[in-house]
Image (cartoon, rainbow, N blue to C red):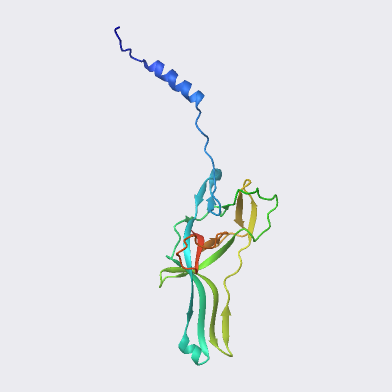
Amino acid sequence: MNLRSRRISPSHLACVGLLASLLCPPMPAQTTVEEHKVYLLGPNDTLTELSLQTGTMKSTVNKALTFVGAGKIKVFTEISGVSAPLRLRPGTPQVFVLGTGRAAALPTSLAPGIYASVFKLDVNNKAGTRELLSFSSAGAYLINKTRTGGPVIPLNFSRFGDYAIRIEPRSALAPGEYAFSAGQATTTDPYAPQQNVLYYCFEID
């Protein structure tokens, strides 16, 4: 039996392609979030994940001055680098999304302050780090100046589907470095120092 090759015309190829597109339509783009991760919410609900960075809890004490009744004590969390990889340009909406667990859908009404917190960081250009202050004290016994952390940043929380939370500062954040604390505060590395804390960081120009 003789086999003859037949050339397939472009019109036949077009018909085959059309039939395939009808039988197997392309999957629509989806916006998905992962548990405990924090994202910047952009146009058309696009999500950009914030950089997860490790903070190390530290303390400094000027022992020489403490011995004579005057000293300086500082307790803080140190994050490497003076700026976060993700930068919000002026005019960028300051709206974020936090992924939650899928064991149960979120309630209709969300209580403020229990899902995440945002902190403003101090930049230490000399050390090349960012710092989240917990406590500092300086002075003598009779004249002492004490500072504990920074002001609490009020946030609004609302549902972003069944398993994610939309987070928005109640007032626009000023330029600077910021860090999200969102649930999983400790590293999953069993060999990491116990004083390590994880933050999702961002910068506002």
Q: Which residue is drawn at 51% across and 24% down?
A: 23
Q: Is residue 134 above or below residue 91?
A: below
User: In front here: 89 or 108?
Assistant: 108
Left or right of 111, for residue 74: left
Q: Is residue 68 above or below residue 138?
A: below
Residue 173 lies in quadrant: bottom right
Q: Is residue 154 above or below residue 145?
A: above
Residue furthest left in the image: 2
Point out the image quarter for the N terminus.
Answer: top left
The image position of residue 92, as x and y in percent, is 53, 53
Q: Which residue is drawn at 59% across and 62% down?
A: 117
The image position of residue 75, as x and y in percent, is 52, 76
Q: Is residue 202 above or below residue 105?
A: below
User: In front here: 78 or 121?
Assistant: 78
Q: How many marks?
A: 0
User: In front here: 3 or 60?
Assistant: 3
Residue furthest right in the image: 109
The image position of residue 126, as x and y in percent, is 40, 73
The image position of residue 182, as x and y in percent, is 57, 59
Left or right of 82, for residue 164: right
Q: Is residue 175 visible?
A: no
User: In front here: 192 or 54?
Assistant: 192
Q: Which residue is drawn at 61% across and 51% down?
A: 165
Q: Can residue 90 be seen in this view?
A: yes
Q: Residue at x 31, y 12 (%)?
A: 5
